[in-house]
Image (tube, coloured by chain):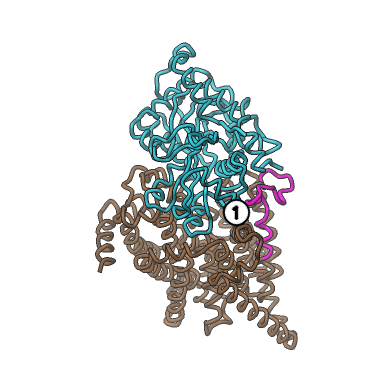
Chain colours: A brown, B cyan
Amino acid sequence: MEIFANFSAGLLTVLQPQTLLYCFIGVFLGTFIGVLPGIGSMAAIAMILPLSFYLEPTVAIVMIAGVYYGAEYGGSIASILMNIPGTPSSSITCIDGYPMARQGRAGVALFITSIASFGGGIIGMVVMAVLSPGLAKLALQFGPAEYFSVIFLGLIAASAVSNGGALRGIAMVMAGLMLSTVGIDLTTGDLRFTLGVPELRDGVHLVIVAMGLFGVGELIASIKANQSGRGRQEIDYTKFYPNRREWRASFGPIWRGGLIGSFFGALPGTGQTVASAVGYAVEKKVSKNKDQFGKGAVEGVAVPESANNSATQTAFIPTLTLGVPGSASMAMVIGALMIHGITPGPRILTEHTELFWGLVASFLVGNIMLLVLNIPLIGMWVRLLQIPYKLMYPAIIVLICIGVYSLNNNVFDIWMTLLFGIAGYLMRLYRFEPAPLLIGFVLGPMMEEQLRRALLLSRGDAMVFLERPISGGLLTVSALILAYGLWTTLRNSRRTKTTQTHNKTSSNTGASS
Amino acid sequence: MTLSLTRRALMALTSAAVFALPAGHAMAEPGAWSDEPVRIVVTFPPGGTSDLVARLLAKHLDENFGQKAVVDNRPGAAGTVAADFVADQDADGTTLMIANNAPFTIAPTQFEELPYAPMNDFTHVAYIGASAPGLFVKPDSGITTVSEFVEAAKANSISYGSSGVGSISHILGEAVDASLHVETLHIPYQGSAPAIQDFRAGVLDTFYDMVAQNSDMIEDGEAVAIAIAASARFPGMPEVPTFKEQGFDIVIENWVGLTGPAGIDPEIAAKIHETTLAVLALPEVATTLNDLGITHQPLSTEEFTGFVETQIDVWKPLITAAGVKGK
């Protein structure tokens, strides 16, 4: 079959010593930078971009891709250990990963992350190899109305991940959406809610929101927790590797996450974040282990990791075959190719066969490298948790400040992060989940843009969202999920009323996590 | 409404330059001008034309002239963040920026208050070149000339995609509307790639974008460029006619140059200027610039300064017409 011939040719390219070396440099550097709070794949690619000019195009793109998914993987390490998501999609991993780490099961969480990322990566790769032309066409089926609807679905899914019930989740998503309207209005160029502060012209940066709500908020919360006697953790090596039950529990989520991720990854822009959120929401519905979600369920780590890693691979499909970058990182990939005189577009499959298949094959090699590199390192990462808090937290604060400052080289951003940190702490106190807020914040501008664009094109006719079949279908699914979520919330709240006295003690102890 | 922009002024300046150059200032030898690495600030995130030009420049300054250079992307607020930053740096030639329309010709009109003065806070050292956008339509639309476009636009409502509000493609769209007395529907995108995706998907009727960057689409028969907003056809794609030769005087070009803080010592400025021109003359660089659709003209520092100054006034009516006058 042609695919196998192409894939073998690609594999041969990747297995050349030079390509292997740069693939390794890519994934290693990506993982390392991804672990640092506030510095994600974008910064990592920007750092390595100049080096890529001196390399063959295929080697260059393999290295950059390695940095990209390496950083996504590294971001999940920080999510699990420190509750600091490197990327919006790994904020979903925080929901169950961090509780696992607090229970002394960080090793298991990291192990499952490695396996799930690997599984998701391979699923994404296979999908990319087999369906690239088809998926590229799928993206072309998506006009503004469809994008609006798919993002809407993502937001509904994001509100469903919340453990405080659908209503709290929707409130957080709405808060995120509102926050995302700060800055220049993309359709008219007007300034909105900037309060005369020039730094707010471009809105609030995602990293500031993520670092503040998760990182700083967590630090403030744990100061209090530690005063009340919570010391450092002992490592229990029997809890280091997943047991048989945990293995079995993560198998299904990896598959589902990988397939969901592959689909959403091919849609430029919405990709990983929607994939993780939808994956998590679906898993929470189908899992037999529903009650454990949010309290440290392995499924809750496996699903978003598998989904976002497969979406990371398939995100290359629109980037390469349509020339449409879904993120700033992908825009840099395009920049790197253009430096070498390669214009991404439909022709890349035929004119640069070697490059395309080399890249696909490098996903296999790179993901194996990540696995081999990271499983031995799990012990080291877990030991990080043994560093006394009085040393670790100041170090994290310094890293967050550096990360945030490096965005625009502006001190204002550090103050903003502190502000969001306080907000994050308050949200923890009142048990609001920060992940839906972050996802609303990320998807908000895209949703607004597509909404307004769709309405402009339809000359103000809102029926366009229901009349177009794909869009109408997605909205129907969203409406059903929403109705179901609200119904269960109502039912649960009725139930809690009757058992309120019984639950009171347990809810108090859970407040700090 | 007559709209004649950069190239005409440029031609005049260039022809003057050929004779005036030797008398103007002492010729400097190309070479390194600082022991420290030079920081080249870019107004946009990595990946765009300005960024590619900066990286090309940085690479060859080091390789061919031993001048270490690093690219520093400081995107934000339509390029004004980067310009504001550069204006505050030491004028010793170690901080330069890729100047372009965004902070120097569009922002002065778009924003009521700017944290910098586009002329007095900068030394505009070297002109690099300019590329021009064009009007793309669908092959099956049957439109092949600007006149046919006018007829179609008057008969039906036509939509066009741009790279964003206040972007050069939006301003061209508004200029075309004003000049041809038609009313088209503007749909802004973030960058040209998503606009082109929607054009391909059949969502948009037309779009404006840099002509050279879409040569593949033209060759594949997915889009027809009916006119380029340059004063002369782009040598890399001679089959695309200009608006001008079809009787519509619309010229809008996207220029890039090398600019530093005000008060760079004239000798250092001359050295930077000569070295930049020497880099641009390298065959490899010339090829890449051509791929990017950039036409280079060797302007002196004085001519480039004069050029930037005139651009603000030239663009002003267009930006106002485009309705992106800042709040």
Vertical placement of A495 versus A154: above or below? below
Q: Report x, y in % for residue B280.
A: 40, 30
Dividing the picture into quadrants, the one containing residue A225 is bottom right
Q: Residue furthest top?
A: B23
Q: Position of residue A338 (x, y in %)?
A: 40, 45
Give the extent of the magenta segment.
Answer: A174-199
Q: Quadrant of the N terminus of chain A?
A: bottom left
Where is residue A150 shown, x and y percent of the image?
Answer: 56, 67
Residue picked out by circle 1: B157
Q: Residue A120: in sight, yes or no?
A: yes
> Which image quadrant is residue B172 in?
top right
Viewer-nearest residue: A353 or A440: A353
Q: Chain of mark 1?
A: B
Looking at the rendered structure, the secondary structure element under dot 1 is loop
Residue A375, above or below A22: below
Quick check: B251 above or below A460? above
A300 shown above or below B158: below
Residue B324 placement (x, y as % from top left): 66, 43
